[in-house]
Image: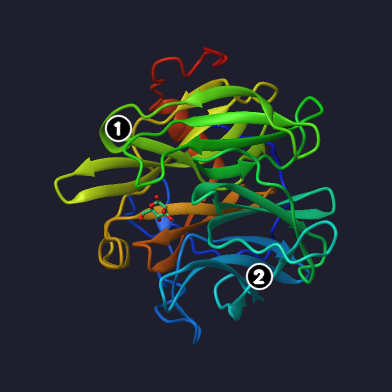
Amino acid sequence: MTKAKIIAESTKNMPWEPKPAGEKGVIWRYSGNPIIQRNPTPSTSRIFNSALVPYGDGFMGVFRADDIRVMQNIHLARSKDGINWEIEDKPIEWVDEQGKSFNPHYAYDPRLVKIDDIYYIIWCTSFGGSCTIGMGYTKDFKTFIRLENSYLPFNRNGVLFPRKINGNYVMLSRPSDNGHTPFGDIFLSESPDLTYWGKHRKVMGATDAWQHLKIGAGPIPIETSEGWLMIYHGVLLSCNGFVYSFGAALLDLEEPSKVLYRADPYLLTPEEDYETVGFVPNVAFPCSALVDTDDGRIAIYYGAADTFVAVAFGYIDEIIDFIKRTNKLGYGDDSIGRD
Ligand code: BMA
């Protein structure tokens, strides 16, 4: 059994439920799922693919909210326990570095990471009539400074690593198209300053079965002595449309475009009503995770059916064992993906 050292912000007070007797999965769902119901605030109809960090004696979240026109926005939310949330009814207001208003036309699927003392928010943003990766930061969750968009269209699922690697910021992303994208692999780019991105590498591609159509990074990768734990979504095209499940892989610590191990089965696939029935059925879309670095507990937050927020629990050591035990690398996964 692996006993990995975990290097992350530890969250002793994270939500938790022990593994239920008879549970066969590596991770298990919170019995109180979904934690956010429909029409959570007067101006919003659904909150789903969302992210949070420990903050003060509780948690701060950036929530993807579709408003009552079905326009996508990011709203700030606060919680003492990670389960019950106070959600602002208005989207986050962004300014540029000169203090001038710089709001996106739409913004969705945010990720949130603390690097040194700064909280970075990365999201899928409107750009040139389509979408790419938007990014901004805050130091106090009161003023939000938006930076230049990271890439040209089209791109989604931007996920920043929680520290620089070999002197550069590192971001995972998923080049896409301007529609629902019937393809998609995970790539990585580096930047010295969060403005200029280059040294692009391919990390891993869609393979087969539950992840045959496209894949995209999920929560901020978690640094462990066994490698970066990357939880990611994979999509299958069924007769009834896309099915979003999520799985896990371990990436090389110093060269994270190199995949060390990749679990062949999913960790979680839509099965519960809140995952299979909603605005978009059959979606489990992870965007965030909390960890206790001492005992390796993890709480994974995922959007369910583009309608709800849900949580699943597990132990990092058990997830790492599962990844190694069921390892199946795809074509080119173990190389430094330059070609
Ligand atoms: C993706 C994104 C996600 C969404 C998923 C399923 O392309 O738009 O926000 O959860 O589709 O609809």
Q: Residue at x 41, y 71 (%)?
A: 70
In the image, taking residue 30 as reference, residue 83 lies left or right, namely: right
Residue lying farthest to the bottom in this orientation? 42
Residue lying farthest to the front in this orientation? 128
Camera-side residue: 251 or 25? 251
Camera-side residue: 339 or 60? 339
Q: Residue at x 61, y 65 (%)?
A: 62
Q: Which mark is residue 71?
A: none
Residue 244 rendering spot, x and y as whole percentages? 34, 48
Q: Nearer the viewer, mark 1 or mark 2?
A: 2
Q: Which mark is residue 212?
A: 1
Q: Which mark is residue 92?
A: 2
Q: Is residue 292 above or below residue 95?
A: above
The answer to whether mark 1 is within 8 Å of ligand 1 is no
Of the residues shown, which amino acid type is indicated by label 2? Ile
Camera-side residue: 108 or 114? 108
Residue 160 rendering spot, x and y as whole percentages? 65, 42
Q: CA distance from mark 1 to mark 2?
A: 35 Å
Of the residues shown, which amino acid type is indicated by label 1? His
The quadrant in which residue 144 appears is bottom right
The quadrant in which residue 4 appears is top right
Q: Quick check: marks 1 and 2 in contact, CB under 8 Å? A: no
Q: Please, what secondary structure does the residue beneath circle 1 have?
A: loop
Q: Please, what secondary structure does the residue beneath circle 2 have?
A: loop
Q: Is residue 38 above or below residue 66?
A: below
| Image colouring | rainbow
In the image, taking residue 312 as reference, residue 99 lies left or right, namely: right
Q: Earlier in the sequence, mark 1 or mark 2?
A: 2
Residue 139 rendering spot, x and y as whole percentages? 82, 61
In the image, taking residue 97 as reference, residue 107 lies left or right, namely: left
